[in-house]
Image (cartoon, rainbow, N blue to C red):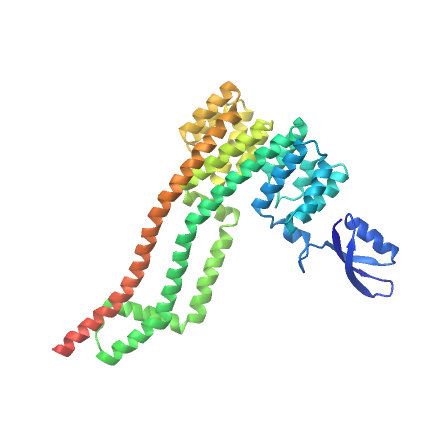
Amino acid sequence: MPKYKYTATSDLNKTTSGLMDASDEAGVIEALKKQNLRALSVNLDTGKKGMSIGFFASKVKSDDLVIFTRQLSAMVGAGVPLLRSLSSLEQHSESPALKAVLVAVIKDVEGGAPLGDSLAKHPNVFSDVYVNMVRAGETAGILDEILKRLALQQEKNATIRKKVKGAMTYPMVLVVITVLAFFGLMLFVIPQIGKILTDLGGPDAKLPLITEIMLGLSGFMISYWFIVIPGFVGGVYALLRYIKTPPGKKQLHHIVLKVPAVNGVIKKVIIARFARTFSSLNGAGVSIIETLTVTAHALGNVVYEKALLDAVDKVKNGEQLSRVLESDGLFPPIVSQMLAVGEETGQTDVVLLKVADFYEEEVDTAIASLSSIIEPVMIVIMGTVVGLVAASVMGPIASLAQNIKG
Protein backbone atom coordinates (compact mmCIF):
# COMPACT_ATOMS: atom_id res chain seq x y z
CA MET A 1 0.00 0.00 0.00
CA PRO A 2 1.46 3.41 -0.92
CA LYS A 3 2.47 5.98 1.68
CA TYR A 4 1.19 9.55 1.62
CA LYS A 5 2.76 12.64 3.14
CA TYR A 6 0.22 14.95 4.69
CA THR A 7 0.05 18.34 6.32
CA ALA A 8 -3.04 19.00 8.44
CA THR A 9 -4.37 21.48 10.96
CA SER A 10 -6.53 21.01 14.07
CA ASP A 11 -9.35 23.11 15.48
CA LEU A 12 -6.72 24.88 17.62
CA ASN A 13 -4.86 25.91 14.44
CA LYS A 14 -1.94 23.61 15.25
CA THR A 15 -0.25 22.25 12.14
CA THR A 16 1.00 18.69 12.01
CA SER A 17 2.74 16.64 9.29
CA GLY A 18 3.44 12.95 8.85
CA LEU A 19 3.20 9.79 6.76
CA MET A 20 0.17 7.52 6.42
CA ASP A 21 -0.53 4.27 4.58
CA ALA A 22 -3.66 4.50 2.43
CA SER A 23 -5.02 3.27 -0.87
CA ASP A 24 -5.50 6.82 -2.18
CA GLU A 25 -5.63 10.50 -1.18
CA ALA A 26 -9.30 10.27 -0.22
CA GLY A 27 -8.45 7.58 2.32
CA VAL A 28 -5.86 9.86 3.93
CA ILE A 29 -8.33 12.76 4.14
CA GLU A 30 -10.97 10.50 5.69
CA ALA A 31 -8.55 9.13 8.27
CA LEU A 32 -7.47 12.65 9.22
CA LYS A 33 -11.10 13.68 9.70
CA LYS A 34 -11.53 10.87 12.23
CA GLN A 35 -8.62 12.44 14.16
CA ASN A 36 -10.35 15.84 14.06
CA LEU A 37 -7.72 17.11 11.60
CA ARG A 38 -8.29 19.05 8.39
CA ALA A 39 -5.97 18.17 5.49
CA LEU A 40 -4.01 21.04 3.99
CA SER A 41 -1.99 18.97 1.50
CA VAL A 42 -1.70 15.27 0.64
CA ASN A 43 1.05 13.98 -1.67
CA LEU A 44 2.33 10.52 -2.54
CA ASP A 45 5.57 9.78 -0.69
CA THR A 46 8.14 8.75 -3.31
CA GLY A 47 11.17 8.83 -1.07
CA LYS A 48 12.22 12.22 -2.42
CA LYS A 49 11.81 15.44 -0.49
CA GLY A 50 9.84 18.37 -1.83
CA MET A 51 8.55 16.60 -4.93
CA SER A 52 4.96 16.04 -5.94
CA ILE A 53 3.22 13.67 -8.30
CA GLY A 54 2.87 16.37 -10.91
CA PHE A 55 6.63 16.87 -11.02
CA PHE A 56 7.36 13.19 -11.50
CA ALA A 57 4.63 12.73 -14.11
CA SER A 58 6.75 14.61 -16.63
CA LYS A 59 9.96 12.74 -15.79
CA VAL A 60 9.11 9.14 -16.64
CA LYS A 61 12.00 7.73 -18.67
CA SER A 62 11.26 6.11 -22.01
CA ASP A 63 13.08 2.92 -20.95
CA ASP A 64 10.85 2.62 -17.87
CA LEU A 65 7.76 3.09 -20.01
CA VAL A 66 8.90 0.40 -22.46
CA ILE A 67 9.50 -2.08 -19.62
CA PHE A 68 6.09 -1.29 -18.10
CA THR A 69 4.37 -1.75 -21.46
CA ARG A 70 6.05 -5.10 -22.13
CA GLN A 71 5.32 -6.41 -18.63
CA LEU A 72 1.69 -5.31 -18.78
CA SER A 73 1.33 -6.99 -22.17
CA ALA A 74 2.76 -10.27 -20.81
CA MET A 75 0.53 -10.25 -17.72
CA VAL A 76 -2.66 -9.38 -19.62
CA GLY A 77 -1.81 -11.99 -22.27
CA ALA A 78 -1.37 -14.60 -19.53
CA GLY A 79 -4.90 -13.92 -18.30
CA VAL A 80 -4.05 -11.81 -15.23
CA PRO A 81 -6.86 -9.29 -14.56
CA LEU A 82 -5.98 -5.76 -15.62
CA LEU A 83 -6.36 -4.19 -12.17
CA ARG A 84 -4.22 -6.87 -10.57
CA SER A 85 -1.59 -6.45 -13.28
CA LEU A 86 -1.42 -2.69 -12.76
CA SER A 87 -1.22 -3.05 -8.98
CA SER A 88 1.60 -5.58 -9.24
CA LEU A 89 3.59 -3.40 -11.65
CA GLU A 90 3.07 -0.35 -9.43
CA GLN A 91 4.33 -2.19 -6.35
CA HIS A 92 7.44 -3.52 -8.08
CA SER A 93 8.27 -0.47 -10.20
CA GLU A 94 11.74 0.96 -9.54
CA SER A 95 10.76 4.33 -11.02
CA PRO A 96 9.23 6.76 -8.47
CA ALA A 97 7.85 8.79 -11.38
CA LEU A 98 6.03 5.85 -12.96
CA LYS A 99 4.90 4.55 -9.58
CA ALA A 100 3.23 7.89 -8.81
CA VAL A 101 1.39 7.89 -12.14
CA LEU A 102 0.29 4.26 -11.80
CA VAL A 103 -1.27 4.99 -8.39
CA ALA A 104 -3.55 7.55 -10.06
CA VAL A 105 -4.27 5.22 -13.00
CA ILE A 106 -5.20 2.35 -10.65
CA LYS A 107 -7.55 4.64 -8.75
CA ASP A 108 -9.36 5.55 -11.98
CA VAL A 109 -9.57 1.93 -13.18
CA GLU A 110 -10.93 0.89 -9.78
CA GLY A 111 -13.63 3.51 -10.27
CA GLY A 112 -14.68 1.84 -13.53
CA ALA A 113 -12.84 4.03 -16.06
CA PRO A 114 -11.34 2.33 -19.16
CA LEU A 115 -7.55 2.03 -19.14
CA GLY A 116 -7.23 4.31 -22.19
CA ASP A 117 -9.18 7.11 -20.53
CA SER A 118 -7.14 6.71 -17.33
CA LEU A 119 -3.86 6.99 -19.24
CA ALA A 120 -5.16 10.03 -21.16
CA LYS A 121 -5.13 12.01 -17.89
CA HIS A 122 -1.31 11.89 -17.93
CA PRO A 123 -0.35 13.35 -21.35
CA ASN A 124 3.25 14.04 -20.25
CA VAL A 125 3.75 10.29 -19.81
CA PHE A 126 1.38 8.62 -22.27
CA SER A 127 1.25 10.18 -25.74
CA ASP A 128 -1.84 10.43 -27.94
CA VAL A 129 -0.51 7.49 -29.96
CA TYR A 130 -0.17 5.38 -26.81
CA VAL A 131 -3.66 6.29 -25.54
CA ASN A 132 -5.41 5.74 -28.87
CA MET A 133 -3.78 2.35 -29.39
CA VAL A 134 -4.75 1.23 -25.88
CA ARG A 135 -8.32 2.36 -26.48
CA ALA A 136 -8.41 0.44 -29.76
CA GLY A 137 -6.95 -2.63 -28.05
CA GLU A 138 -9.59 -2.50 -25.32
CA THR A 139 -12.38 -2.14 -27.87
CA ALA A 140 -11.13 -5.05 -30.01
CA GLY A 141 -10.18 -7.25 -27.04
CA ILE A 142 -6.54 -7.52 -28.12
CA LEU A 143 -4.91 -5.29 -25.51
CA ASP A 144 -1.92 -7.61 -25.00
CA GLU A 145 -1.07 -7.61 -28.72
CA ILE A 146 -1.46 -3.83 -28.93
CA LEU A 147 0.84 -3.35 -25.95
CA LYS A 148 3.50 -5.48 -27.67
CA ARG A 149 3.30 -3.20 -30.71
CA LEU A 150 3.53 -0.15 -28.50
CA ALA A 151 6.63 -1.41 -26.73
CA LEU A 152 8.33 -2.15 -30.06
CA GLN A 153 7.40 1.25 -31.44
CA GLN A 154 8.72 3.03 -28.34
CA GLU A 155 12.00 1.14 -28.54
CA LYS A 156 12.44 2.10 -32.20
CA ASN A 157 11.61 5.75 -31.53
CA ALA A 158 13.95 5.87 -28.55
CA THR A 159 16.75 4.34 -30.63
CA ILE A 160 16.37 6.98 -33.35
CA ARG A 161 16.27 9.80 -30.78
CA LYS A 162 19.45 8.54 -29.13
CA LYS A 163 21.24 8.30 -32.48
CA VAL A 164 20.23 11.83 -33.49
CA LYS A 165 21.24 13.23 -30.09
CA GLY A 166 24.52 11.33 -30.27
CA ALA A 167 25.28 12.78 -33.70
CA MET A 168 24.57 16.32 -32.47
CA THR A 169 26.50 16.08 -29.20
CA TYR A 170 29.98 16.50 -30.72
CA PRO A 171 29.09 19.57 -32.84
CA MET A 172 27.32 21.22 -29.91
CA VAL A 173 30.35 20.67 -27.68
CA LEU A 174 32.58 22.24 -30.34
CA VAL A 175 30.22 25.22 -30.64
CA VAL A 176 30.32 25.80 -26.87
CA ILE A 177 34.12 25.48 -26.82
CA THR A 178 34.43 27.91 -29.75
CA VAL A 179 32.21 30.52 -28.06
CA LEU A 180 34.06 30.21 -24.74
CA ALA A 181 37.42 30.39 -26.51
CA PHE A 182 36.35 33.52 -28.40
CA PHE A 183 35.27 35.32 -25.22
CA GLY A 184 38.41 34.16 -23.44
CA LEU A 185 40.65 35.50 -26.21
CA MET A 186 38.78 38.79 -26.45
CA LEU A 187 38.70 39.45 -22.70
CA PHE A 188 42.06 38.12 -21.53
CA VAL A 189 44.52 37.32 -24.35
CA ILE A 190 44.08 40.10 -26.92
CA PRO A 191 44.41 42.94 -24.33
CA GLN A 192 47.76 41.55 -23.19
CA ILE A 193 48.94 41.19 -26.77
CA GLY A 194 47.84 44.77 -27.51
CA LYS A 195 49.85 46.01 -24.53
CA ILE A 196 52.94 44.16 -25.74
CA LEU A 197 52.60 45.58 -29.27
CA THR A 198 52.18 49.11 -27.88
CA ASP A 199 55.27 48.70 -25.69
CA LEU A 200 57.33 47.48 -28.64
CA GLY A 201 56.16 49.88 -31.33
CA GLY A 202 55.03 52.85 -29.29
CA PRO A 203 51.57 54.41 -29.10
CA ASP A 204 51.80 55.71 -32.70
CA ALA A 205 52.80 52.37 -34.24
CA LYS A 206 50.95 51.52 -37.45
CA LEU A 207 49.16 48.20 -36.98
CA PRO A 208 47.52 46.00 -39.65
CA LEU A 209 43.77 46.45 -40.14
CA ILE A 210 42.90 43.01 -38.76
CA THR A 211 44.87 43.77 -35.60
CA GLU A 212 43.11 47.11 -35.19
CA ILE A 213 39.75 45.37 -35.54
CA MET A 214 40.65 42.72 -32.97
CA LEU A 215 41.95 45.29 -30.49
CA GLY A 216 38.89 47.49 -31.02
CA LEU A 217 36.51 44.56 -30.53
CA SER A 218 38.41 43.43 -27.46
CA GLY A 219 38.40 46.94 -26.00
CA PHE A 220 34.66 47.26 -26.55
CA MET A 221 33.96 43.92 -24.87
CA ILE A 222 36.16 44.79 -21.89
CA SER A 223 34.58 48.22 -21.47
CA TYR A 224 31.02 46.98 -21.82
CA TRP A 225 31.30 43.36 -20.61
CA PHE A 226 28.33 43.95 -18.30
CA ILE A 227 26.24 44.56 -21.43
CA VAL A 228 27.88 42.16 -23.90
CA ILE A 229 27.83 38.98 -21.80
CA PRO A 230 24.27 39.37 -20.41
CA GLY A 231 23.15 40.47 -23.87
CA PHE A 232 24.65 37.35 -25.47
CA VAL A 233 23.16 35.02 -22.84
CA GLY A 234 19.82 36.84 -23.03
CA GLY A 235 19.83 36.62 -26.82
CA VAL A 236 20.44 32.85 -26.74
CA TYR A 237 17.72 32.42 -24.11
CA ALA A 238 15.26 34.56 -26.09
CA LEU A 239 16.02 32.56 -29.24
CA LEU A 240 15.41 29.26 -27.44
CA ARG A 241 12.15 30.58 -26.02
CA TYR A 242 11.06 31.89 -29.42
CA ILE A 243 11.58 28.59 -31.24
CA LYS A 244 9.26 26.96 -28.70
CA THR A 245 6.42 29.31 -29.67
CA PRO A 246 4.15 28.29 -32.60
CA PRO A 247 5.55 30.96 -35.01
CA GLY A 248 9.16 30.23 -33.98
CA LYS A 249 8.70 26.49 -34.23
CA LYS A 250 7.17 26.88 -37.68
CA GLN A 251 10.11 28.96 -38.93
CA LEU A 252 12.67 26.57 -37.40
CA HIS A 253 11.03 23.51 -38.95
CA HIS A 254 10.92 25.20 -42.36
CA ILE A 255 14.60 26.12 -42.07
CA VAL A 256 15.87 22.67 -41.02
CA LEU A 257 14.10 21.15 -44.02
CA LYS A 258 16.15 23.41 -46.31
CA VAL A 259 19.60 23.12 -44.71
CA PRO A 260 21.85 20.92 -46.90
CA ALA A 261 22.96 17.61 -45.35
CA VAL A 262 20.78 18.14 -42.27
CA ASN A 263 17.47 18.12 -44.16
CA GLY A 264 18.09 14.60 -45.46
CA VAL A 265 18.43 13.18 -41.96
CA ILE A 266 15.42 15.11 -40.65
CA LYS A 267 13.18 13.95 -43.49
CA LYS A 268 14.17 10.30 -43.08
CA VAL A 269 13.53 10.45 -39.33
CA ILE A 270 10.08 11.95 -39.95
CA ILE A 271 9.20 9.39 -42.65
CA ALA A 272 10.28 6.50 -40.41
CA ARG A 273 8.20 7.88 -37.53
CA PHE A 274 5.20 8.42 -39.81
CA ALA A 275 5.32 4.91 -41.23
CA ARG A 276 5.71 3.16 -37.86
CA THR A 277 3.09 5.26 -36.05
CA PHE A 278 0.57 4.98 -38.88
CA SER A 279 1.20 1.24 -39.12
CA SER A 280 0.72 0.71 -35.38
CA LEU A 281 -2.52 2.70 -35.21
CA ASN A 282 -3.92 1.22 -38.40
CA GLY A 283 -3.05 -2.30 -37.28
CA ALA A 284 -4.79 -1.63 -33.97
CA GLY A 285 -8.04 -0.92 -35.80
CA VAL A 286 -8.09 2.86 -35.32
CA SER A 287 -10.07 4.66 -38.04
CA ILE A 288 -8.12 6.20 -40.92
CA ILE A 289 -9.16 9.74 -39.96
CA GLU A 290 -8.16 9.29 -36.32
CA THR A 291 -4.94 7.56 -37.41
CA LEU A 292 -3.96 10.46 -39.66
CA THR A 293 -4.79 13.06 -37.00
CA VAL A 294 -2.86 11.33 -34.22
CA THR A 295 0.09 10.54 -36.50
CA ALA A 296 0.28 14.17 -37.64
CA HIS A 297 0.76 15.36 -34.06
CA ALA A 298 3.36 12.65 -33.37
CA LEU A 299 5.80 13.59 -36.16
CA GLY A 300 7.45 16.52 -34.37
CA ASN A 301 7.55 18.79 -37.43
CA VAL A 302 4.82 21.38 -38.10
CA VAL A 303 5.37 21.28 -41.89
CA TYR A 304 4.58 17.57 -42.10
CA GLU A 305 1.91 17.93 -39.43
CA LYS A 306 0.05 20.49 -41.54
CA ALA A 307 0.40 18.29 -44.63
CA LEU A 308 -1.22 15.33 -42.87
CA LEU A 309 -3.96 17.43 -41.32
CA ASP A 310 -4.75 18.82 -44.78
CA ALA A 311 -4.79 15.23 -46.03
CA VAL A 312 -7.51 14.42 -43.48
CA ASP A 313 -9.94 16.74 -45.24
CA LYS A 314 -9.11 15.27 -48.64
CA VAL A 315 -9.51 11.69 -47.38
CA LYS A 316 -12.89 12.68 -45.90
CA ASN A 317 -13.89 13.80 -49.41
CA GLY A 318 -13.11 10.35 -50.81
CA GLU A 319 -9.52 10.73 -52.09
CA GLN A 320 -7.05 7.90 -51.54
CA LEU A 321 -4.34 8.70 -49.02
CA SER A 322 -1.60 7.40 -51.33
CA ARG A 323 -2.56 9.93 -54.02
CA VAL A 324 -2.81 12.76 -51.50
CA LEU A 325 0.70 12.10 -50.18
CA GLU A 326 2.06 11.75 -53.70
CA SER A 327 0.78 15.20 -54.67
CA ASP A 328 2.14 17.22 -51.71
CA GLY A 329 5.82 16.54 -52.52
CA LEU A 330 6.94 16.07 -48.89
CA PHE A 331 6.83 12.28 -48.95
CA PRO A 332 9.17 10.24 -51.21
CA PRO A 333 7.53 8.32 -54.07
CA ILE A 334 8.25 4.99 -52.36
CA VAL A 335 5.94 5.91 -49.49
CA SER A 336 2.93 6.69 -51.70
CA GLN A 337 3.62 3.65 -53.90
CA MET A 338 3.89 1.27 -50.95
CA LEU A 339 0.82 2.84 -49.37
CA ALA A 340 -1.11 2.30 -52.62
CA VAL A 341 -0.15 -1.39 -52.51
CA GLY A 342 -1.34 -1.57 -48.91
CA GLU A 343 -4.66 0.05 -49.80
CA GLU A 344 -5.20 -2.43 -52.64
CA THR A 345 -4.31 -5.52 -50.58
CA GLY A 346 -5.81 -4.38 -47.27
CA GLN A 347 -2.43 -4.72 -45.54
CA THR A 348 -1.50 -1.09 -45.04
CA ASP A 349 -0.03 -1.72 -41.58
CA VAL A 350 2.25 -4.52 -42.85
CA VAL A 351 3.45 -2.52 -45.85
CA LEU A 352 4.18 0.63 -43.84
CA LEU A 353 6.04 -1.44 -41.27
CA LYS A 354 8.47 -2.42 -44.03
CA VAL A 355 8.77 1.25 -45.02
CA ALA A 356 9.57 2.12 -41.40
CA ASP A 357 12.27 -0.56 -41.20
CA PHE A 358 13.80 0.66 -44.46
CA TYR A 359 13.94 4.32 -43.41
CA GLU A 360 15.26 3.50 -39.95
CA GLU A 361 18.20 1.80 -41.66
CA GLU A 362 18.54 4.86 -43.91
CA VAL A 363 18.64 7.08 -40.79
CA ASP A 364 21.65 5.13 -39.49
CA THR A 365 23.52 5.69 -42.76
CA ALA A 366 22.49 9.35 -42.99
CA ILE A 367 23.58 10.10 -39.42
CA ALA A 368 26.97 8.51 -40.03
CA SER A 369 27.40 10.63 -43.18
CA LEU A 370 26.29 13.77 -41.36
CA SER A 371 28.79 13.19 -38.57
CA SER A 372 31.60 12.82 -41.10
CA ILE A 373 30.60 16.18 -42.64
CA ILE A 374 29.98 18.15 -39.45
CA GLU A 375 33.26 17.30 -37.74
CA PRO A 376 35.61 18.82 -40.39
CA VAL A 377 33.28 21.83 -40.80
CA MET A 378 33.42 22.59 -37.07
CA ILE A 379 37.19 22.11 -37.04
CA VAL A 380 37.52 24.57 -39.94
CA ILE A 381 35.38 27.11 -38.05
CA MET A 382 37.49 26.76 -34.90
CA GLY A 383 40.66 26.93 -36.99
CA THR A 384 39.43 30.11 -38.66
CA VAL A 385 38.87 31.82 -35.30
CA VAL A 386 42.30 30.80 -34.06
CA GLY A 387 43.85 31.76 -37.42
CA LEU A 388 42.37 35.28 -37.29
CA VAL A 389 43.77 35.80 -33.82
CA ALA A 390 47.17 34.44 -34.87
CA ALA A 391 47.22 36.64 -37.97
CA SER A 392 46.32 39.73 -35.93
CA VAL A 393 49.24 38.98 -33.60
CA MET A 394 51.95 37.68 -35.92
CA GLY A 395 51.49 40.39 -38.55
CA PRO A 396 52.48 43.38 -36.39
CA ILE A 397 55.17 41.37 -34.57
CA ALA A 398 56.83 40.53 -37.92
CA SER A 399 56.52 44.18 -39.01
CA LEU A 400 58.06 45.45 -35.79
CA ALA A 401 60.87 42.91 -36.06
CA GLN A 402 61.74 44.18 -39.56
CA ASN A 403 61.73 47.79 -38.31
CA ILE A 404 64.09 46.85 -35.48
CA LYS A 405 66.47 45.14 -37.95
CA GLY A 406 66.31 48.17 -40.24
Residue at the top extreme? Answer: 344
Observer-nearest residue: 135 or 242? 135
Residue appearing at x 31%, y 61% in the figure: 385
| 312 relative to 230, above or below | above
Residue appearing at x 70%, y 40% in the figure: 86
Residue 357 position in % (x across, y down): 46, 33
Residue at the left extreme? Answer: 406
Residue 302 position in % (x across, y down): 49, 41
Residue 180 position by quadrant: bottom left
Q: In the figure, is residue 143 to the left or right of 280?
A: right
Q: In the figure, is residue 49 to the left or right of 342?
A: right
Q: Quadrant of the C terminus?
A: bottom left
| 401 relative to 350, above or below | below
Residue 6 position in % (x across, y down): 77, 58
| 325 relative to 259, above or below | above
Residue 54 position in % (x across, y down): 66, 51
Residue appearing at x 42%, y 50% in the figure: 168
Observer-nearest residue: 3 or 132? 3
Observer-nearest residue: 179 or 164? 164
Observer-nearest residue: 391 or 280? 280
**In the rendered image, is residue 354 in sight?**
yes
